[in-house]
Image: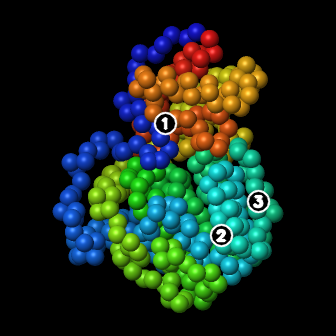
Amino acid sequence: MIKKPTTKPKNPNFSSGPCAKRPGWNIQNLKTDSLGRSHRAKLPKQRLVEVINLSKQLLKIPADYKVGIIAGSDTGAIEAAMWSLLGKTGVEVLAWESFGSDWVKDIKEQLKIKNLTIHQSDYGDLPDFQKINFDNDIVFNWNGTTSGVCLPNADWIIDNRKGLTICDATSAVFAMEMDWHKLDVTTWSWQKVLGGEAAHGMIALSPKSLERLSEYQPTWPIPKIFRLANNKKVIEGIFKGETINTPSMLCVEDAIDALNWIQSIGGSKGSIDKSQSNLQVVKTWVETKDWIDFLAKDSSTLSSTSICLKITDPWFLELSVDQQQLKIKEINSLLDKEQVAFDINAYRTAPPGFRIWGGATVESSDIETLLPWIEWGYQSIKE
């Protein structure tokens, strides 16, 4: 039995969404003059436009791409893309964790697209990119938030593709390099790497995807909340701060605060570097342990944000999955009681284990302090 650690993380919030607030965050730092105002009024609309412009600037999104705010966080943004754009061609969906599987279900059961090819793999792996038909539209996650497996790059996407590439990048944007010219649609939310509040998502559309909206209209009825075009006319207001539904201006002000913080640490490069440093802390620790490992099987696909770990101790592996989950809950209860780690349990459909958020708002020193506590918790329940 190892000795109980004495040093605790300064911030024990390691949830994978909503994620930890930025270092030094204080609600008193938020502007409040837009609160209680119509979001269509001049000042609140300026703040919405500020979110769009700062996001586009910090992420270095190409000038000819349009960036907008969509209701319903990243889920609303990716659903808007699928409902508004799919159906002209066949569809290829990549799924290697729970959210990718959700998009499979929506395309198959809600949109009922007949020419559908599903490229699925187990937790820890990526699908085989060689089997993808780029004449079709491609729907995929950049980072598997529930599996800790991310795309190492976008080299597998061909330049002369006929179909659109539609990427759910909610736990990747601001933490991983985005190859924008390979991405026709990209969606993300404020509540992940920015550490912002949930409410609205973001969508970036390439000229190619905008052309699709102006030339093609799906046969199915599109709910207003998911509508990016009306009668083959792009709804330009989405990209000018005219949100489809009423946003929380408090969440908008918080998003601006987060974006300004990203700018202060060196922009997206600074936030990517911080996230990579967090992953390196865990990698260094895992390399010295014989009872725990990453869920990702290939080191080149390790996520730096949703860092997923599995227990490899033979004693643990002999237990049933239900017993394993109970043991993980025991460890999490111990760490919660000690107030050293909140919300580090694996996603409910993922293999039993831990999931530590490693986005830019989490300090590497807190992860360094957390890891001995995880080992102490494990040894405690093993005894």
Camera sees residue 192: yes
Residue placed at 73% from the left, 19% from the top? 315
Q: Amino acid at mark 1?
A: Asp
Give whichever of 250, 364 is nearer the camera: 250
The crowd level at tag 1 (other Cα within 10 Å; few <14, some 14-19, many 20+) is many
Q: Cβ–Cβ below 8 Å for labels 2 and 1?
A: no
- Alpha carbons under labels 2 and 3: distance apart: 19 Å
Please rate how many residues cluster around mark 2, counting C-alpha atoms within 10 Å: few if below 14, some from 14 to 19, many from 20: few
User: Looking at this view, is 60 or 326 the one in front?
Assistant: 326
Dot 3 corresponds to which residue?
119
Q: Nearer the viewer's eye, disc 3 or disc 1?
A: 1
Question: Mark 1 — residue?
Answer: 343
Percent coordinates x, y for residue 311 in the rendering: 67, 28
- The span from disc 3 to disc 1 (Cα, nearest Å) is 30 Å
Q: Quadrant of the N terminus?
A: top right
**Discs 2, 3 touching: Cβ within 8 Å:** no
Q: Residue furthest right?
A: 131
Mark carried by residue 110: 2
Q: Is residue 299 visible?
A: no
Few, some or many C-alpha atoms within 10 Å of disc 3 (few <14, some 14-19, many ≥20)? some
User: Which colour scheme appears in the figure?
Assistant: rainbow
- The type of residue carrying mark 3 is His
Task: Answer with mark 2 or mark 3, whichever residue precedes in sequence.
Answer: 2
Q: Earlier in the sequence, mark 3 or mark 1?
A: 3
Helix, strand, or loop for circle 3?
Answer: strand
Q: How much space separates mark 2 and mark 1, taking CA atoms?
A: 32 Å
Return the residue nearer the eye: 254 or 181: 254
Q: Position of residue 18 (x, y in %)?
A: 44, 48
Residue 357 located left or right of residue 323: left
* Residue that extends furthest to the left in the rendered view of this protein: 33
Direction from residue 48 to residue 302 in the image, left or right: right
Q: Amino acid at mark 2?
A: Gln
